[in-house]
Image (cartoon, rainbow, N blue to C red):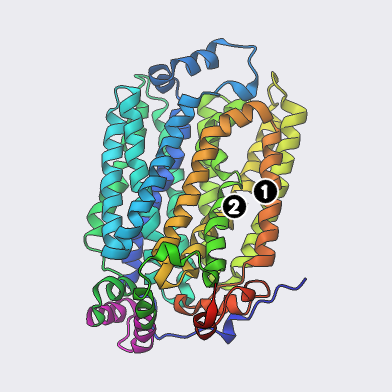
Amino acid sequence: MAVGIVPTSEISVNYNGRITWFVVLSSMVAATGGIIFGYDIGISGGVISMAPFLKKFFPEVFTKMTQTTKISNYCKFDSQLLTAFTSSLYIAGLIASFFASPVTRTFGRRPSIIVGGVAFLIGSALGGAASNIYMLLLGRIMLGVGVGFANQSVPLYLSEMAPAKYRGSFNIAFQLCVGIGVLSASLLNYGVEKIKAGWGWRISLAMAAAPAIFLTVGAFYLPETANSLIQHGNDHEKAKKILQRVRGTFDVQAELDDLIKASDNSKAVKHPFKQIIKRKYRPQLVMSISIPFFQQVTGINVISFYAPILFQTIGLGASASLMSAVVTGLVGTSATLLALLIVDKVGRRAMFSFGGIQMLVSQLLIGVIMAVKLGDQGVLSKGYGLLVLVLICIYVAGFSLSWGPLGWLVPSEIFPLEIRSAAQSITVAVGLIFTFIIAQTFLAMLCHLKSGIFFFFGAWVVIMTGFVYFFLPETRNLPIESMEKIWRDHWFWKRFVCDEQDYDKGET
C-alpha cells in the first residue's frame, strides 16, 4: 500500500526572515529546561547504585545486593520503594501537566517556564538536604512539577520561535539538552561516587539547582512568542515587533497575518479539550497519544534510569558501571547533535525508520547474549561485557537519531493553535504516564523476564516503525499554521479531515 505523502515543496509557505542571535539566545535559555529534565533522568540511576545512598534510604536493597549470593542477577535491585524514588517524579509531572496547559494557554509560554524553573529549584534543594525517605520523595515530586510545566511549555516555545525551515533543528535543541543533562548527571555520579565520606549522592541531587537557576532567571528575560501574544493578549503590534526582532527583517506581515488568522480560529474554541476529540482533529489526537507512548516503549528509559544497575547486573563494578553510563550518555548526546544537523534535510520519516531498525537489531543481539552467556548466577566475560556495552551504545545512538528528538518535535509542530496547548498537555501526560509505569515496573520486569525484556521492547519497536511508515506524513519545512494540509492529502487521514465548509455542514 502506498503512503500518499505530498512533497513539502508543493505546500510550504515561505516567510521572510533568517536565524538571528536573538532567537538563538532565547531558544538556548528555554531549552535549558531540557538539561534539567535530562539531569533528573540520569541522576537517579547513578545514586541508587551508590552504597551509602542505599544504606541510608533503602537498607533492604543494600543488604540483598551485598550479602545475598544465591539471588538471581536480574533480581538484586527489585524493590517497589526503590523504583518509587525514580517514578514519583513522573506521576507528579503527569498531574502538573494538566495545570500547566491552562497556564500556558492563558498567560503564555514564558510564565509556565518560570513556574517550572522555580519547582526545579525547590526539588533540588529538598533532594540534596534529604534526611529521610519522605523528604527525598518530596524533592522528587517537586522536580516532577517542574518537568510537567517545562515539558508543556518549552517544546511549544521552541517551535513557535523558530523559522519554519529550521524548526526541526531548533526543537531538537530541547532533546539535545536532555542528552547533555543525562551526560552531566552520569559524569557527576562517576566523580562523587569516589567520595569516601559517603555524601557524594547529596551533591548529585543538589546540583540540579545549577541549570534551574539559569532557567528561572533567564526566563524573566525571555520574549513571549508572537503566537502567544496574539492568542492571549491580542497585542498585534507587540507581536509584530517580536517577529521583526526574531526574524531579522521588517517584512513579517505575511507571517503575522497567518498567526492572527490562526488566533481568531483558536479564540472561537472555548473548550479545547472537547474540540480535540472531534473528527477533524482525529489525526492530531492519535499522534498526541501514540507518539509519546511509542517513545517510552522503545525501552530507552531502561537505559536512562537504570544504566548503572543494568551494567552491575552483567557483572561490572560500581565505578565501571557509572563510567559505562557516561559512555552511553556521550553517545546519546553526540547522536542527538547529529540529528539536529540533519533533521531538516533528511526529514522526520526517514529518521524514524532508520533509528527503529538500528534499535531493533541491537536489542535483539543484547537479549541473545544475556540469555546465552549470563544466566541467573553467571558473570559475563570481559569481552562479552564490552560487546553488550557497544550494542547498548548503538541502541542509544539509534534512539537519539529518531524517537528521542522526534518524539518531542513532531507533536509540537502538528497541532493547530486552537488546540495546541491542550494537545501538548495530552502528549506530555501520556509520556509521563508510561514513563511512570515503566520506571515503576522495570526492576520487577527485569527480575521476571530476565533477558527477555529486550525482546519485549524490541517487539514494540517493530510496531512503532510500521506505524510511522503508514500513518505519519512528512512535516519537514512546513510552517506550523499550514500543517493541516498534510492531513487532507494523506491516504488514510483524509477520510477524517475535511475542509471547514464541509465540517460546518455536518461533521459528527
**Placement of 444 over or under 237, stated as above or below:** above
Q: Nearer the viewer, residue 173 or 275?
A: 275
Q: Nearer the viewer, residue 35 or 428?
A: 428
Disc 1 element: helix
**Placement of 41 over or under 234, stated as above or below:** above
User: Residue sitting at 40 percent across and 65 percent down?
Assistant: 272
Kind of residue sitting beneath label 2: Phe
Look at the numbered discs 2 and 1 and tell me whether their residues touch, using CB distance below 8 Å: yes
241 part of magenta stretch: yes
Kind of residue sitting beneath label 1: Trp
Residue of label 2? 294
Magenta extent: 237-260
Residue 190 shows in this picture? no
Residue 405 is situated, as x and y percent measured from the top left of the image, at 52, 58
Residue density around tag 1, few if under 14, some if 14–19, many if 20 or more, within 10 Å: some
Disc 2 element: helix
145 part of magenta stretch: no
Residue 90 is situated, as x and y percent measured from the top left of the image, at 43, 42
How many marks on residues? 2
Q: Residue 122 appears in which quarter of the rendering?
A: top left
Residue density around tag 2, few if under 14, some if 14–19, many if 20 or more, within 10 Å: many
**Placement of 409 over or under 126, stated as above or below:** below
15 lies left or right of 242:
right
User: Residue sitting at 59 percent across and 28 percent down?
Assistant: 444
Q: Nearer the viewer, residue 504 or 2?
A: 504
User: Residue sitting at 55 percent across and 29 percent down?
Assistant: 309
177 lies left or right of 114:
right
Residue of label 1? 460
Residue 488 shows in this picture? yes
